Amino acid sequence: MEQGINSAKLVLCICSKNYVEKSNNGNGGTGYESMILTQELLRNVNIDYIFSIIRNNTTNQKLPICLGTKLYIDFEEDDKFYDRYRELIERIY
């Protein structure tokens, strides 16, 4: 996980309700991943290769605490899926 995040050119973080809860509570692999992301963000605040995607999360807390300052793309509304998909592709390229 550490090697992958540190050497990746792009990281997509799918932030479901379950993922956000596990990340914030430090549970299992998700908690460990959150710790790695936090360390990376502390070293380099201007990380632009981490894209957060919101799906299956209708709560007010869309992102885990470690990604709280990052922009995200909200894929919650199925009727706007293609617009959001296009936004994601544009941000990637």
Image (cartoon, grey):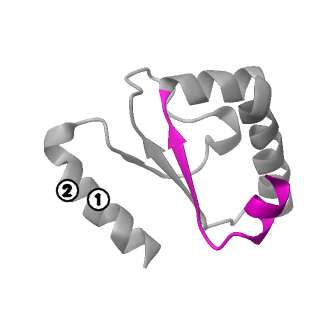
The residues colored magenta run: 1-16
Find numbered disc 2 in the image and state the secondary structure of the residue it sits on. helix
**Front-lying residue, 82 or 48:** 82
Residue at the spot of label 2: 82
On the image, the x and y values in percent for residue 81 come to 22, 49
- Is disc 2 in contact with disc 1, using a CB cutoff of under 8 Å? yes
80 is higher (above) or lower (below) than 91: above
Is 27 magenta? The answer is: no
Front residue of 4/48: it is: 4
- Count residues near mark 2 (Cα–Cα under 10 Å), then give few for <14, some for 14-19, many for 20+: few
Q: Mark 1 points at which residue?
A: 85
Q: Residues within 10 Å of mark 1 (few under 14, many from 20)?
A: some
Under mark 2, the amino acid is Tyr
Give the secondary structure at mark 1: helix
> In this rendering, is residue 65 above or below 4?
above
**Residue 75 point in image, percent of width and height:** 32, 43
Locate residue 85: give its quadrant. bottom left
Instruction: Identify the image quadrant of the C terminus.
Output: bottom left
At label 1, the amino acid type is Tyr
Please indicate whether residue 23 sits to the left or right of residue 93 in the image: right
68 left or right of 24 in image: left
Mark number displayed over residue 75: none
Q: Quadrant of residue 9?
A: bottom right
Q: In this view, does 22 lie above or below 9?
A: above
